Amino acid sequence: MNNSNPANSLTASLAVGKPKKLQHSDLSLLKYRFMVFYRFLLAIVGGYALASLTAMVVAQAFSEYRAAAVMSATLLAFSMHCAAFIWVFMVHKTLKATLGIVLPCLLLWAMTLYLGA
């Protein structure tokens, strides 16, 4: 039978020493986590902006038929937000994902100004 105290083994395993420097693998893991977090924010915020601008353009373009325009704009906005979220994580390059969200947002914003917001 082992006569060692479990508390001694616990304190030995939690011994505090000098903080170690970040190694290359730690930095690459941190960089990867930041990239995933950035894509998540891009998908949430950028997808929302893209969906909102899409809804505004569709609602303004078909303003003569108000009920149909609102329903169509809402359905299309939900679809655009889901598609943007999937697309941001599907693309290999982060810059391509950013430009794929920002450029359509700018185009839709210009169309909103043209249609008279």
Image: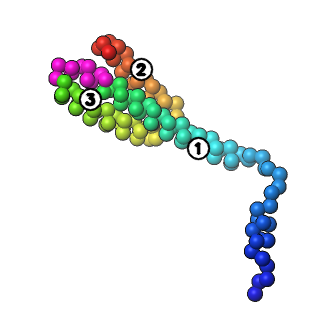
Q: Position of residue 25 (x, y in %)?
A: 68, 48
**Quadrant for the N terminus in the image:** bottom right
Above or below 7: residue 64: above
Residue 57 is covered by the magenta coloring? yes
Q: Which mark is residue 116?
A: none
Label 2 secondary element: helix
- Give amino acid for label 3: Ala
For disc 3, the neighbor class at 10 Å (few under 14, some 14 to 19, many from 20) is: many
Main SS class of the magenta portion in the image:
helix
Whether residue 35 is visible here, answered yes or no, is: yes
Give coordinates of residue 76: x percent, y percent. Answer: 28, 33
- Residue on which disc 2 sits: 106
Question: Is 19 left, or right, of 44 in this rendering?
Answer: right
The kind of secondary structure element at disc 1 is helix
Mark 3: secondary structure:
helix
What amino acid is labelled 1 in the image? Arg
Looking at the picture, does residue 113 appear above or below residue 93?
A: above
Q: Are there few (<14), some (14-19), or many (20+) residues within 10 Å of tag 2?
A: few
Q: Residue furthest left?
A: 65
Q: Is residue 58 magenta-colored?
A: yes
Start and end of the magenta stretch?
56-65
Specify which label sits upstream in the sequence, 3 or 2.
3
Disc 3: which residue: 73
- Image position, residue 91 (x, y; %): 46, 38
- Viewer-side label of 3, 2: 3
Identify the amino acid type marked 2.
Leu
82 relative to 67, above or below: below
Q: Which mark is residue 33?
A: 1
Q: Residue at x 34, y 34 (%)?
A: 80
Mark 1–mark 2 Cα distance, whole angstroms, equals: 28 Å
